[in-house]
Amino acid sequence: MTQAQFAERQSPLPAPLLAVRDVSVVFGGIVALNGVSFNLHEGQILGLIGPNGAGKTTLFNCLSRLYQPSAGDILLEGASILSRPPHRIAEIGIGRTFQNVALFPNLSVLDNVRLGTHSRTTSDIISDSLNLAWVRRTEATVNKKVHEILGYLDLESVADTTVSGLPFGTQKRVELARALAADPKILLLDEPAGGLNHEEVHVLGDLIRRIRDERHMTVLLVEHHMGLVMSIADHVVALNFGRKLAEGTPAMVQADPDVIKAYLGSKDQ
Amino acid sequence: MAAVEDIVTEAPAVEAVPKRAMTLGTGTSLVMLGLLLVVPLFVKNFIIFQMTMLLIYGVAVLALNILTGGSGQFSLGQSAFYAVGAYTSAILMEQFNVNYALTLPIAGVICFGFGFLFGQPALRLSGVYLALATFALATAMPQLLKLGYFEKWTGGVQGLVVTKPDAPFGLPISQDMWIYYFTLVITIAIYIFSVNLLRSRSGRAFMAIRDNEIAAAAMGVDVALYKTLAFGVSAGITGIAGGLGAITVQFVAPDSYTITLAISLFLGMVVGGVGWLPGSIVGSAFIIFVPNIAEGISKGLSGAVFGVLLFLVIFLVPHGARQVAIVGQQLIGRFRKN
């Protein structure tokens, strides 16, 4: 039994919802992630921090199966997700937003959020073409759910607007609404504060906490905005050059000399 | 490699139509339907024949619209699917004595399969490269139909003559008029099914892929499946149009289904407005009537006249009939206010 496994057994916390185990990603000769491990427990808000190029987004892309790790494993409730193709990640309860907003620009807000329910519904082209009764029932359920979420995120007024015409901040909220529509267990937020002003960041922090508390979701947050991470995260993992630098409560990580060095540089450099 | 990828992603992005605007209002739809129902009663048989072809090409343009406007995939190979549909109907009717109406669903299913299978290798291609791959299909089809090996069914270079069906139940109308109303019913059904499809969960998945494949996959959309399904649906509908075409023209021959037909259908889609389903009929009218008009202006230079007319349309209304409809709607709105 390795020390890590032993520590896990002894840990007072229940089994983690998501376990990242020794994940490495290599692009050509460049090691983007090097043996990164951490656990995400149910109901946590975990902040993943690190300077540019530290491997945060790479890790996210492993979680949504856009990249294949060259080593290690990622377990959701004890089962590996690495054999699943990207389009079969949403159905097991991992939802995400993207760093630079990846909405469907020519569709309305309503349709974007409806697409969030794709993994939770079924249909086939023949029933859809004939608009059969069960298809209409599914659509009615979807619409009810979508309007509830639009109301929750205060997006009702733009429901019929085409997404490409909306301000960036609103687009980010639409993306969040789309992710919520799938009722994920884990919400992956890739730099949700990027491009937002001070006031908006504050509102966003409250919103993320509300989502965790009211909608019972676990949040994994990649963020540059230290203020946001330190104020809402329960647990912080710091990465640099693809390695885990430090892990712990926000205060512990903030005081860690290696983290300070990575962000500010050291005297002898 | 990076440069290639840049070209692929920058390849003509499909101008998308908001879903609400994908259909006509109830009033306009009823007027259109009324015209299509009543006009044939007062015109000559040749005009009825032309109106039938208008509907048939309209269906074929609509099929391309689902593929390009809906799922964002290009095709210059629709003539191949049209040909397979036409030959399926013709062979079943003439060699196996199948009722003409029954040949259409069979043509649709065979073409759906053909399109779905063709969509598999096409998955690796997008934009201009996909257009070229489908172009290759359109170029190959007439020669495949001429192959000696299939000659006892296809009639080889000679093609097949198809018997014109009579009106059923002893209806006192001409054969042409019967085929027209038969085609009209099928056209309306296909139009309604297509609108339903594009408004449904599957249609949303098509459009999500058109707009952003990575995000679509993250939402749980099986990108490969829906892309090939779009090809299958488009090919299936085109096949039904081809079958109707064979029954109406009463003749199938390899050289009726060359790349020229595929380009005409593509043209029809652009003139009608990419992604705007009602525009399909306008695009179809353009590819049927404008060459005749051009010939009326100058017999010797009809091609050049057609080119000039096409250029004018593209130059003045790049978004086709859809743009005209929007401008018209705004004008009416302003007129009502005054």
Image: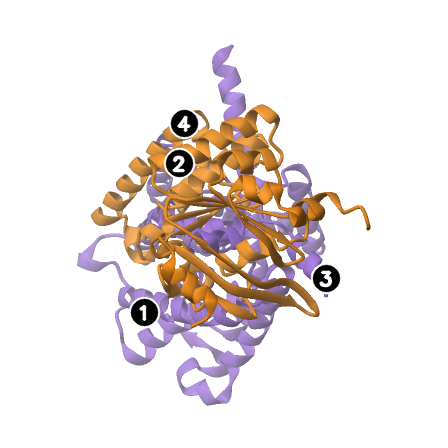
Chain colours: A orange, B purple
Q: Are marks 2 and 4 in contact (CB under 8 Å)?
A: no
| Residue at image mark 3 | B2
- Chain at tag 2: A
**C-alpha gap between disc 3 and disc 1:** 45 Å
Tell me what residue is drawn at x 45 percent, y 72 percent. Answer: B117
Tell me what residue is drawn at x 35 percent, y 57 percent. Answer: A15
Residue B159 in sight here: yes
Q: Nearer the viewer, residue A209 or A252?
A: A252
Tell me what residue is drawn at x 54 percent, y 64 percent. Answer: A23
| Mark 4 crowdedness (10 Å alpha carbons): few <14, some 14-19, many ≥20 | some
Q: Nearer the viewer, residue A222 or A118?
A: A222
**C-alpha gap between disc 2 and disc 4:** 18 Å
Residue type at mark 3 is: Ala
Q: Quadrant of residue B33?
A: top left
**C-alpha gap between disc 2 and disc 1:** 52 Å
- Chain at tag 3: B
| Residue at image mark 2 | A211
| Residue at image mark 1 | B106
| Residue at image mark 4 | A156
Q: Are marks 3 and 1 in contact (CB under 8 Å)?
A: no
Give the mark, 3 or 1, whose residue is nearer the N terminus: 3
| Mark 3 crowdedness (10 Å alpha carbons): few <14, some 14-19, many ≥20 | few
Residue B160 position within the rendered picture, expressed as x and y whole percent measured from the top left:
42, 76
Q: Are marks 4 and 3 in contact (CB under 8 Å)?
A: no
